[in-house]
Amino acid sequence: MPLHPADLFHLLWLPVASFFAGVLNTIAGGGSFLSLPALIHATGALGIGAVTAQATNTVALWPGQLTSLVAFRKKLRAYGWSMLPLVVASGIGGWLGGWLLLTTPDRWFKVLLPWLLLFGAVMFIVSLPLGKWLANRSGGKRYETGLLIGMVLVSVYVGYFGAGGGFLVMALFGICGVHDIHEMNALKVLTAAVSIGIPTVQFILAKSVVWHFCIEMAVLAAVGGYLAARFSTRINQRVMRWTVALIGLLTAGYFFLLNAMQHG
């Protein structure tokens, strides 16, 4: 007896995508380029909308942010309460992004999706050289107000969609004169946990999470992330960044084509 398309995606594509999403998020970021398309197809075959799929994807991948936060706990203690303004800024932005997603009609989100994927992929390509150039342009001066405003704006994107958000944060640091690599990593991990964590709570309270998919994805992503962390030193970071960017571009192209076929 042939499998229903939803069963096929559930049994094959979604588990594999979730595992490798955990791998990518640990090594380079961009796991949503794999997990979200798989989840949209699996839920879509069951008549569940794309906004709910995005919300479920966010909740499923958030535990990975918590494990990163635990790994950075010693570095975070060194900065103490000085990070509170950025935490508040990322929380406000994350809440706005989550609210925007919940109020976006499914048909609009499907139109926006390939553009969001394309934006995330481009950020993977340009963020590193852009961040270095901006760091040189800042002349060592630190712009605290600009950093807070920028963090709110970036966190809106993270709460709404998220893919490539970590690289947006790093570029923001370059603009605002944050150059210490330890501080940058600690702030990126902390603000990501908050800007994704608050929308996670919103989506759960709004009952916009498909739990049987969410739990499966979370477990497999955690396994992928754990294994990737063990072998991350053997992986060429430059190759991985370009691989993630290519996955993002191909995924964006797929959804552009899908939209064109549906509206053609």
Image (cartoon, rainbow, N blue to C red):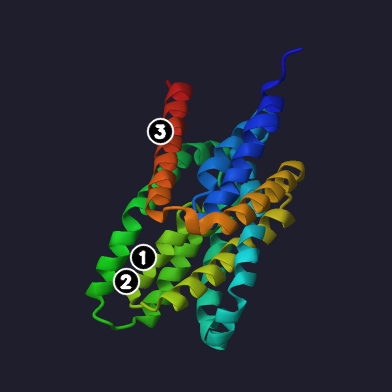
The amino acid marked with disc number 3 is Gly
- The answer to whether mark 2 and mark 1 are in CB contact below 8 A is yes
Q: Earlier in the sequence, mark 2 or mark 3?
A: 2
Q: Which residue is mark 2?
A: 175
- x%, y% of residue 27? 51, 56
- x%, y% of residue 259? 46, 29
Residue farthest front in this picture: 234
Q: Is 253 drawn above or below residue 155 in the view shown?
A: above
Q: Quadrant of the C terminus?
A: top left
Residue drawn at (64%, 56%) of the image: 226
Give the SS element for disc 3. Answer: helix
Residue nearest the observer in this picture, 238 or 233: 233
Task: Report crowding for label 3: few under 14, some 14 to 19, many 20 or more residues within 10 A (C-alpha).
Answer: some
Q: Quadrant of the N terminus?
A: top right
- x%, y% of residue 142? 33, 82
Q: Is 119 drawn above or below residue 200 in the view shown?
A: above
Q: Which mark is residue 171?
A: 1
Q: Which residue is mark 3?
A: 253
